[in-house]
Image (spheres, helix red, strand yellow):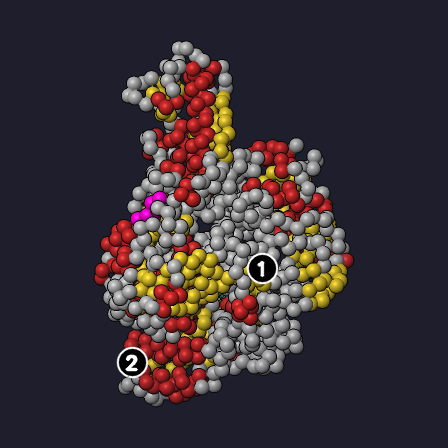
Amino acid sequence: MNNVRTIQETVVRFAPGKDHDSLMHKPGYAGKPFSRVDANLKVKGEALFSADFKVENPAFAALVYSTITKGRITTIDTSEAASSSGVLAVITHENAPKIPTPPVFDPTGESKGTAASDSPVLQDNRIYRDSQPIAIVIAATLDQAEYAGTLVKVDYETEIATVSFAACKPEAVTPSDVLGEEPEVKIGNAGTAFSEAEATTDNIYRTPRYNHNAIEPHATIAVWNEDDSLLVYDPPQNLYGVKHTLAILFGLAPEKVRVVSPFVGGGFGGKGTLWDNTMLCVIAAKTVKRPIKLVISRAGVFRLAGGRTLSEQRVALGAKKDGRLTALIHSGITAMSKHNNFPEQFTFPARHLYSPKNIFAGQKVVKLDTIANTFMRAPGESIGAFALELAMDELAYSLKMDPIELRRINEPKTDPAKNTAFSSRHLIEAYTLGAEKFNWQKRHAEPRGQRDGKWLVGQGVATAYYPVLRLPATAGIRINADGTAFVKAAAHEMGMGTATVQIQHAAEKLGLPLDKVSFQYGDSDLPESPIAGGSNQTVSIVASVTAAAEKIHKELLALAGRNADSPLSNLTYEQIEARNNGLFSKTDAPEGETYMSILKHAGKDHIKVNASSEMPTELKQYSMHSYGAQFCEVRVNEETGETRVSRWLGSFDCGIILNPKTAISQFRGGIIMGIGMALTEETLFDERKGRIMNPSLAEYHIPVNLDVPYIDIIYNNIPDAHTPIGAHGIGEIGITGVAAAIANAVFNATGKRVRDLPITLDKLL
Amino acid sequence: MRENIEQPEALVDVTGLPFTQIEELSNGSIYIGATVKNTEVANHRIIRERYPVLAQAILSGASGQIRNMATVGGNLLQRTRCYYFYDEAAGCNKRHANSGCDAIDGFNRIHAILGASDACIATHPSDMCVALAALDARVCVEGKNGAREIAFNDFHRLPGNTPQIETDLQADELIMAIEIPQTEFVANSLYRKVRDRSSYAFALVSIAAALEIQNGKIVNIRIALGSVAHKPWRAFEAERALIGAAATKENFSRAADQELKQAKGFAHNMFKIELAKRTIVSALNNLAESGGAR
Ligand SMILES: Cc1cc2nc3c(=O)[nH]c(=O)nc-3n(C[C@H](O)[C@H](O)[C@H](O)COP(=O)(O)OP(=O)(O)OC[C@H]3O[C@@H](n4cnc5c(N)ncnc54)[C@H](O)[C@@H]3O)c2cc1C
Ligand code: SF4
């Protein structure tokens, strides 16, 4: 069958091409700036994203969305749509196959659920929110499906919806947990300490809703095979989560569901949970018994996938005259839907960054009739750091103290909330290195001290902060008799360089040249990997590959031991190491044998193992975080209020950097996204209807090239002794602290404190 | 059409029409055919030398790719960017007569401060048209009843009670060309666009201005504002106030106040009134410095 062949071709195998970098043959691959192994494919347009896969006889689906916010469908007339040319079926709640309530994302992983929301998908006539999908139109071509979608006629009975954050604030509730942690942390008595403090700041900070705009929209191809197994091409950040959730929804054994996703065209959290579109595509394929392709339009992505919640935060700081913090209060409210549980952990930075004896960090939520909010790059930390780091700057200014000095004075010795030792913390060093390279000492502390014609110039700093996360993972290694190795994990390549870095690490672990190692990923038939979220993927997989390498080396040693002539036969595992394409004595003696030789003598054409990493108990024992210092310079037009970022330096403390090229891209990408968060992006959510009014790239302003200056990145490369090869995940920290650094620089330039994002020109007129 | 606002029964491709010339006419006017691409207009030598405001306006609009495709006729007839106009779920008098105007109490940051009505507060978003308004261009149109010329300022309409009727163009008429009269002093002109990001965003406020000063007195002036009204807004009041006056910042500022006295803001766009004033003053100052004087 054609499908089978396609499947075999989909698993992405990367063995770098012949004309590779000469560095590749040198030992010590980790830490080297190798180019992405998939760069050629991508530049040539040959990398296959979900919607690019060719399947036999596909039909196309388009969605019809609700135009009311809450209520019931009284009639839905699909007759005209159904008789429109090319239409194969119109599916509504009246004729959709019955499926259970989607199991929502569970941070513990126990329920295996990964749905964004538990609102039913096409199961009854109720409308839970604006833009809820209410019909799927399937046709021979996309145009026919989209056109027929406009012919579906719906009558509603509307009910009053709860969509106004402002109106609901008084009834905000404390959530049961915040990503598995306590919703409130109280240390000492922050209220009393604040009221007795010698110096204080106490302000409200607001961040708006934001939406992800990955270049690849959510796109799915669903194929039901003859044996009732399900194949789905979909770009998730959580292959196994999608596999299990679909299995639950469609009553299948998990091994009957295969999710394939060699490349994800950007996720940023927007593909971290399962949205309705994938389920609808599977429903459609089941109904018409044909492969279905469902590609969501840009506006559809805004309507179908939730974004970042808005927030209203209070930060109150109390300090002694010398700058020592005595009280830190960080509280506030975010919005969720009635069908999910994601409060967005904006009070987390306050729990771990500074050293006051009295801390209150607690958050509340309101629950609205809207689409579920979800993760967006550094959820919580990015918006929380905005408020906290602005407050630190405000305190520093009121104390006439350099803002970096204020951080130095308040550097904690142990974790303020957990009272555990830091696994690795060099925040002040990051500030020192950054300040020197940025020429921080040249800054005028007083606002409006620098100008260039009509442009007021200012500089700002803020702390970047993101926790270290590792999740248990499984990896497979297969070593072949020809001396090559395959490393396998159901990992996600969203453009970060996952495959490249994993090959670098595995080659080093196995003592093989890079071009002998290939990495297979992007397929839920491969060993289980965790969600690519919380910046955990790289280190989680490195840990599982480490476990698999140990296991395969032990098995190879045992195999070699059966051959009395093998130089390895009287060596123990502790006495050997992997190098020169095989296993050799750790001493200088050339005792050892290549993998080829071991397998040849054993008469095997390959050996393979799967192994899992251990539970991440280190996260309980230590306070494990990444840090950084963001430095920026802005120019604000005195006449028009336009703000332009003119200089950037990010100085990071994130353990060992495995590949400077891919890592610096991640830092820069995060900073660019932060510039958007600070200055240009805002989802216009009309509270009268709970509807997004700017669902397009023309009106939702992500930064353009001209908005982004050269971004200088430095990092200290200090290994964390408690993480796999001393590395931290670095995908999200880049965005944290960016908006605060910009707001602080705007204050330095203009003397105006803007505490509401985005900092648009009207706020500076 | 992609937004399902227009549902035409038939489409006629006008891109093949032979209105592709940019020519200097015997009376010194410049003739620009309706199907000339925006990029070509902006790069034309005569336009750059004699009408820099037009080249700058076009280059500040959209993106390079869009400008390469966009025609002069099409740019004149582009629709508003009002969010509610594009939303099938919204009340919008422009889209469905008598369905209300959701923008008035909704997101109206990009909406009109001048010449709006209770029926519609949308703006015309074009950059090019602001320059053409300042240049006193004429729109040459032709229909069943023959050819005629429409003064640029009469081409686009204020919304009144019929926001769905946006221009003076009749259903059977085609735009053939634009003619820009010869006006030497507009060589000292500029276009300034204030927007939410550095490029690829519509204006919050824009200005096309030209200035001539003799013996310290303003003898010729043109001011048109963009993204403040349902049409490119020729600031006649400000122009009248400045003719014969000294080219000082104070006078510019007084004239800007005069023009914007009639302005009315809404919840999210009040700032545009102040921004428009500042932009006028800034642009005229620049022109006074850059050679308005002879
Ligand atoms: C993302 C985006 C950003 C943009 N940003 C800007 C910006 O910043 N500034 C700006 O000014 N513009 C901007 N534009 C608008 C762009 O300039 C216009 O889309 C373009 O000028 C339209 O030209 P066109 O030839 O493609 O017209 P079309 O879209 O093909 O036509 C528009 C209308 O004019 C009619 N028409 C075309 N020619 C004639 C004729 N000769 N006679 C009669 N009717 C005719 C068509 O029937 C149609 O109704 C932007 C557009 C997009 C999509
Ligand atoms: S401003 Fe005009 S275009 Fe916008 S909603 Fe109101 S009537 Fe429609």
Q: Is residue A563 above or below residue A68?
A: above
What secondary structure prevails in the magenta region? Answer: loop
Q: Residues within 10 Å of mark 2 (few under 14, many from 20)?
A: some
Residue A599 within the magenta-colored segment of the rendering = no
Mark sitting on residue B293: 2
Magenta-highlighted residues: A422-426
* Chain letter of disc 2 in the image: B
Front-most of residues B42 and A410: A410
> Please, which chain is the residue tagged with disc 1 on?
A
Identify the disc placed on residue A337. 1
Q: Given the current orientation, which residue lies at the most extreme top position? A: A564
Q: Residue at x 37, y 86 (%)?
A: B254
Which mark is nearer the camera, 2 or 1? 1
Is any atom of residue A708 visible in this view? no
Whether residue A642 is situated above or below residue B237 in the rendered picture? above
Toward the viewer: A361 or A216?
A361
Front residue of A16/A208: it is A208
* Left or right for A55, reference A43: right
Q: Quadrant of residue A616?
A: top left
Query: Helix, strand or loop at disc 1?
Result: strand
Quarter containing the C terminus of chain B: bottom left
Mark 2 → mark 1, Cα distance in angstroms? 63 Å
Which disc is residue A644 wearing?
none
Residue shown at 36% from the left, 79% from the top: B281
* Quarter of the rendering occupied by the N terminus of chain B: bottom right
